[in-house]
Amino acid sequence: MAAHIRRRLRKGATTTAVAAAAVAALAASQAPAATLADGAAGNGDPKAAGEDTASGETDGAATGNSPYYTDLPPLVTPDKPGSSSNLPAAGSAEAGIPASILAAYKQAERTVETTDPTCRLPWQLLAAIGKVESGQARGGRVDANGTASPRILGPALNGQGFALIKDTDGGAYDGDAVHDRAVGPMQFIPSTWASWGQDANGDGRKDPNNIFDAALAAGRYLCANDRDLALSADLDQAVLSYNRSTEYLRTVRSWFSYYQRGTHEIPDGTGTLPSSPSTPSPSPHPGTGSGPSTAPSPKPSPDKPGKPSPGPSKPGGGDSTSPKPKPPTPKPTPPAETFGSLENAGTGPLRATAGQAFDERVSVRARNALGAPMAKVPVTFTVTGKTGTLFADGKKSVTVRTGADGTAVAPELRAGEKAGEFTVTAVAGTARPRTLTYAATVTARQADAIARTDEKALVAAPGEMFADAVTVKATYRDDAAAGVAVTATMVKDRLGIIDNDKGPYFKDADGKPVRTLTTLTTDPEGQLRLPEIFADDNEGTYLLRLTTEGGASVVIELTVEAPEETAPEEPAETPDATETPKATKP
């Protein structure tokens, strides 16, 4: 807050000096005139342009005050006034804009004109910024979709001569998980891209390396705060909000005026790359103002013989006044070798019956910072939950490396015996790990049919035990259903809606009558032999209903009746001893 107040107090003091310095710089460079509005450096902007840009404070600058090209336009007019941008490639290559790049700028102008007509965004301003930031995507080196190839990355914004911006994207855009870097043809830092990124080419991605996406994002950024870019003051504020440097404003203004006088389209990949990127110092050089760049103009005025060059000399050039070269900074890890993201590679619903193998296997895909599939990335899969589910080798956690297509597939999952839900997590990356979580479900073992193994009538006398045991077999898809839970209930109706409180019963562990059992399970062959059944003193026909997990059921009749009484047999007659037996024929 204090810094903000100081900036406001200094604003009036810096306005005139900054504007005068910028105009003087233009005159000294013999570049085409570009009018600076009064108070452009800080009027209405939260930060005066004359402040040191290497202080580590970005204050919302789109690029994080990263380096930029300081080459100025040639002195000659690109084409005669009123010339068409569709002229064939001719004249200075500096005047030409690669076809895809030019198309992106013009598309952005048309889009913003529709959504924010009061901004009055000129495509030439986008062209000027694109020229200064990346040399028109390195001379138009983009693929058929307009994506820079190779990707364009600025140096690490580590506070060493540049702003200090710690990583905000986990290296997803810039391949750096420690500090942010400006990315793409319009050099957005990841944190700004997160707010302003656009999908202008309709591919479903907001890609800062795509010129169509980046140009539209830059256009909307420049139009922020209700700016009218037809007003010089608003235009200056917009440019300074992109990179807070008076030299940057001078350079962009020069190219803006140059492109306004005419340009032409050239084939992609044939543009020239500027040769003088800025090299900001931690503090301004004495007497040179506060711009971040110490790079010389591409066309320095000749010095007197023997006079040291005002620009930095090459290492080893023998110039005693030259600063000692800094030790070479470590070469950043190429984005293609930097892990960027982890995504689902098509894993379907994870469901299985207890004790069975899951049909689906967890599959993920790793991508590098450029969005391409990345091989040899270790991915750790872990099962968490209380269902007893494990990977096929009996482990709860396994590590698999991605293949050439960036895909890693976990081993087969085998469901535990307890029904319920659990999760499988996939983790990759060390500095900023990426995690995917998959929900999975174990359902109880099921049967779609259950039947008695015999058809013998089940009868018992009142107060007696049924002599024959009840045995059933459960099946699922015609195969034995092992481990299936079965509920046995004495009921009054075949649908089992009303329980019966009299007639046959089971006994619990204490020997007390119970008419419902819920702890029954089929054996490995899918069979179940019910406990002993007893009859009370009530005669009649009763129903026993067995229901399995999965909804299969069978109803069994139990009959309680007294045995039939039988009459005693009469003794056989014996012959009278006095009776003379009849004679028989020989």
Image (cartoon, rainbow, N blue to C red):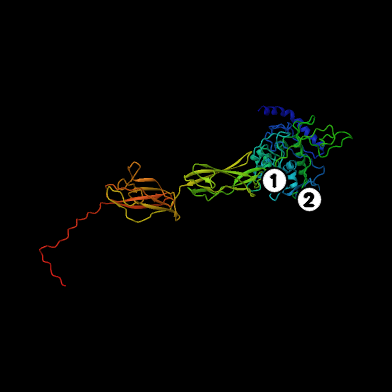
Q: Answer yes or no: do the residues labelled 1 and 2 have beta carbons within 8 Å?
A: no
Quadrant of the drawing holding the N terminus = top right
**Quick one: label 1, few (<14), some, or many (20+) residues within 10 Å?**
many
Mark 1 vs mark 2, foreground winner is: 1
What residue is disc 1 on? 211
Depth check: give the residue in front, 394 or 282: 394
Q: Quadrant of residue 453?
A: bottom left
Q: Marks 1 and 2, Cα distance to the nearest angstrom?
A: 21 Å
Q: Which residue type does callout 1 highlight?
A: Ile
Looking at the rendered image, the quarter that the C terminus falls into is: bottom left
Q: Position of residue 542 (x, y in %)?
A: 31, 50
Q: Position of residue 413 (x, y in %)?
A: 53, 47
Tell me the residue at 63%/39% (across/down).
Answer: 430
| Percent position of residue 318, x then y | 85, 35
Q: Residue at x 89, y 34 (%)?
A: 306
Q: Which residue is mark 2?
A: 89
Q: Indicate which disc, 1 or 2, sits on the residue closer to the N terminus.
A: 2
Of all residues, the one furthest to the front in this rendering is 586
